[in-house]
Amino acid sequence: MLWVAQGNQNSVYLLGSIHLLRPQDHPLPPVIELVYDDADVLVMELDMDDIDLVDVMRTFRELGVLQGDVKLKNLLGDELFAQASAAAEATDIPLDLLEQSEPWLAAITVQELLAMRVGFSGELGIEQYLTNKALADGKPIRGLETVSEQLGFLDGLPMQAQSQWLVHSLVDGLRIEMIVDQLVEAWRVGDIDYLERELLHEARMSPQLHDAILVQRNLNWIDRIVDYLDDDEDYLIVVGAAHLVGDDGVIELLLERDVDVSQLGLSE
C-alpha cells in the first residue's frame, strides 16, 4: 500500500496505513523503512507529536458524550437499537456501557474493542511506529487535519448514518477474526482489489458515511498534497489505507490531476 508521486524536484510517498497492528505484524516491510529514510518530512492525518491529550479528551466529551436524560437507545430508535443489541450480544460487547455515547463514538469504541480482542494495538500501529522514529531522528512531523476537524466530520454525520455505522461495526465484529490475517497480508503485498472490497464495503453501505469519512476528507487533503509536489523536500504521507483506494481515493484524485503516480513493490 505504497505509492510515489513525482514532482519536478522531489518525491512524495503515499503510504496506506493500518492504524492498529499486532506484534506478529512487525517488522514492517523493508520498503517502508526505505521511503521513511528518504523522506525529509513525515505527514500524517494528525500531527502526532503535537497532540494535547487533555484537549483530545475534552473534544471527545464535548462532541461524543450525551448530556442529560438522552441515551444511545433514544437516538437509534427501537428498530436499530434492537439490531445493535442482538449484534452486541453475539459479539459479547457490553452495549449498556455505551449508553451515554453518540452513535459515532459508540461505533469507534466498538471497532477498537473488537480490534484489541484479536491482539491489535495503536502503540504498534504504523503512525505510532513512524512517530517514534521521527521523534528520535528529529524529523519534522505535520498533520493534514486537527483532532477537532477529524471528530467534527463524524459528529456532523446525520443521526441515521451514525446509527447504521454502529450497527455495521457490531455486525462486522462477527467476522473480524476470520478476515484479519488476510487483511494484513493484503496490506503488506498491496492487494488493491481485496483491500478496496474489504475497506470500503462498510462505508458504501451508507453513502453519507462514505462521503463524510472518506470522500470529503480526501478532497480537503488533495490540494495540500499537490502543493508538496512543488517543494524541493521529499515527503512521506501516511493516511488510512481506505483513503488511497477506490474511485474517490487520493491516488485516483492525483491521477485526475495528471500527477505521475506509481505503486511501489515490496522489494523497491
Image: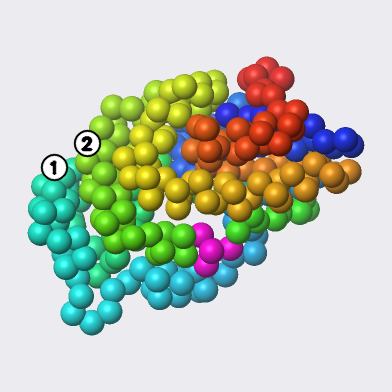
Outermost residue toward the bottom? 68
* The N terminus: image quadrant: top right
Q: Position of residue 115 (x, y in %)?
A: 35, 43
The amino acid type, in three-letter code, at marker 1 is: Ala
Q: Amino acid at mark 2?
A: Leu
Nearer to us in this view, 146 or 164: 164
Q: Residue at x 79, y 32 (%)?
A: 6
Magenta segment: 146-150
Q: Secondary structure at mark 2?
A: loop
Question: Mark 2 to mark 1: distance in Å?
Answer: 7 Å
Residue 232 is a magenta residue: no
- Label tally: 2
Toward the viewer: 185 or 208?
208
Q: Is residue 94 above or below residue 253?
A: below
**SS at mark 1?**
helix
Give the residue pinned by disc 1. Answer: 90
The answer to whether the residue labelled 2 contacts the one labelled 1, judged by CB atoms less than 8 Å apart, is yes
Residue at image location 42% in from the left, 59% down from the top: 154
Find disc 2 in the rendering and name its residue. Answer: 174
Is residue 147 rendered magenta in the image? yes
